[in-house]
Image: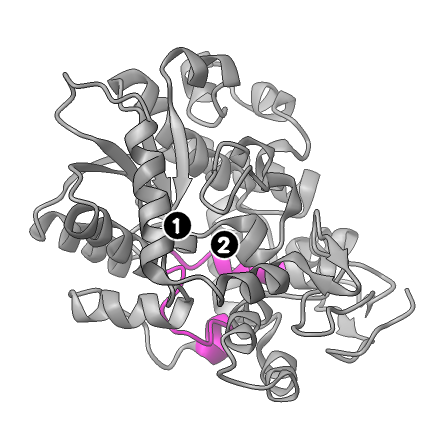
């Protein structure tokens, strides 16, 4: 396991790409710092103008939202700064999975004058697919993430809306090279995201007999995008102050509900992410056991690149919070999918990187490496 010299990204991140032991997110951060806000804003505006718009539609674009901090800021920015008429689309969680905070934050977007469509998977299918993806991929949220990313373009195609906005660019702001586009704003390679490609779609077909249920989870083919002249743009690269912390501050001032003081329960050091449900924190814990980094690492990397904290300071925080997820959250998930806690850990341990962790039967793995230090594995 090799760490980036500047941040705490490792070469174990899916689709990681290093140059001279520096990750692509840090390289982009260095280039981005030399560009002014007005230059980036004008580039994005020019790209939007070149997109063939459907003049008959009541909306200029679709924004994928979740009821979290990024969603609120993106919706305001597109409407008030770009002057567009956005339709907000949320691929929401089933009622038993969604938090009250998440529901309140979706309601807050409506109160602020936005039109919102919420598409929710069938609850029993969602539960079944979550357990199946946990067993097959060590990822309890794979199906819900597939639903989230697929629902937005499916509705864009159906409604004839040509422009889709997402927030951060996973390649340049996180480090997933598979979705890197022609420029920082180009999101048309999102179909290559690891969540959408790893394992294919056959397991969805095997689990769900009815095709109309399957469609909710399947990302549209490129031909369907081309027929409707649909383009995807990332908003994050247009903002000088795009970060989890800044987005949370802005959204809180616009009425977003946060969950302060829960970092020892969820591992979320921002207290402002994944507000719409609890189970996603299990997934970040599982990611930690598979790849040696978790949610805290992603947040700390942003702060290191912004020069808010040093790499050494970040290491101390990551050591404390990466992989944190309370037993209560795990217990609730086990009830949701119908397994025991021992079953849960036995499945999780099958996906744990045994070169990085010592396995304990029916219990949490134990870390063997030191954060920030290259580790032979």
331 relative position to 91: left or right: right
Q: Which residue is mark 2?
A: 333
Farthest-out residue, right:
376
In the rendered view, would you say 49 is above or below 5?
above
57 relative position to 335: left or right: left
Query: Percent from the top left, x then y, of residue 118?
Result: 25, 36
Query: Percent from the top left, x then y, of residue 111?
Result: 8, 52
Q: Quadrant of the C terminus?
A: bottom right
Nearer-the-camera pick, 245 or 31: 31
Nearer-the-camera pick, 59 or 14: 59
Q: The magenta stretch spans which residues?
A: 263-286
Q: Secondary structure beneath disc 1? A: loop
| 281 in the magenta segment | yes
Instruction: Specify the label residue 30 is tagged with.
Output: none
Marked residue nearer the N-terminal end (1 or 2): 1
Query: Percent from the top left, x then y, of residue 242?
Result: 39, 63
x 64%, y 55%: residue: 344
Q: How is the image coloured?
A: one colour
x 65%, y 27%: residue: 200
Query: Percent from the top left, x then y, of residue 128?
Result: 52, 35
In the rendered view, would you say 304 is above or below 27?
below
| 13 in the magenta segment | no
x 68%, y 42%: residue: 137
Between the C-alphas of marks 1 and 2, the distance is 28 Å
Instruction: Specify the label residue 167 is tagged with.
Output: 1
156 relative position to 202: left or right: left
Query: Residue 254's quadrant in the figure?
Result: bottom left
Count neighbours of disc 2 (C-alpha within 10 A) and say few if under 14, some if 14 to 19, many if 20 or more. many
x 33%, y 65%: residue: 247
Assess whether mark 2 and mark 1 are in contact (beta carbons under 8 angstroms): no
| Count of labels in the image | 2
Nearer-the-camera pick, 110 or 236: 236
């Amino acid at each position: 396991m090799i760490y980036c010299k500047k941040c705490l990204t490792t070469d174990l991140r899916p689709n990681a790409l290093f140059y001279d032991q520096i990750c692509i997110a840090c390289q982009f951060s260095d280039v981005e710092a030399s560009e002014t806000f007005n230059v980036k804003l004008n580039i994005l505006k020019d790209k939007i103008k070149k997109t063939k718009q459907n003049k008959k539609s009541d909306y200029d674009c679709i924004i994928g939202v979740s009821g979290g901090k990024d969603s609120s800021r993106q919706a305001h920015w597109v409407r008030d700064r770009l002057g567009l008429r956005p339709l907000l689309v949320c691929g929401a969680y089933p009622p038993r999975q969604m938090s009250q905070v998440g529901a309140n934050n979706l309601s807050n977007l409506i109160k602020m004058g936005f039109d919102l469509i919420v598409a929710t998977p069938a609850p029993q299918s969602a539960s079944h697919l979550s357990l199946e993806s946990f067993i097959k991929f060590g990822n309890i949220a794979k199906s819900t993430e597939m639903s989230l990313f697929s629902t937005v373009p499916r509705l864009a195609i159906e409604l004839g809306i040509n422009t889709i906005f997402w927030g951060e660019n996973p390649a340049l702001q996180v480090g997933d090279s598979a979705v890197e586009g022609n420029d920082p704003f180009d999101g048309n390679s999102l179909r290559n995201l690891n969540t959408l490609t790893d394992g294919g779609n056959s397991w969805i077909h095997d689990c769900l007999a009815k095709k109309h249920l399957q469609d909710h989870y399947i990302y549209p083919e490129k031909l369907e995008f081309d027929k409707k002249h649909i383009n995807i743009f990332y908003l994050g690269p247009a903002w000088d102050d795009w970060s989890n912390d800044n987005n949370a501050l802005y959204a809180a001032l616009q009425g977003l509900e946060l969950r302060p003081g829960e970092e020892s329960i969820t591992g979320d050091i921002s207290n402002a992410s994944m507000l719409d449900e609890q189970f996603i924190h299990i997934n970040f814990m599982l990611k930690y056991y598979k790849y040696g980094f978790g949610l805290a690492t992603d947040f700390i990397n942003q702060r290191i690149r912004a020069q808010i904290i040093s790499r050494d300071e970040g290491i101390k925080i990551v050591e404390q919070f990466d992989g944190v997820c309370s037993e209560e959250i795990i217990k609730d998930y086990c009830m949701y999918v119908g397994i025991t806690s021992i079953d849960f850990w036995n499945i999780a341990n099958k996906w744990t990187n045994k070169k990085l962790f010592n396995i304990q039967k029916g219990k949490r793995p134990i870390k063997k490496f030191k954060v920030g230090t290259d580790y032979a594995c």
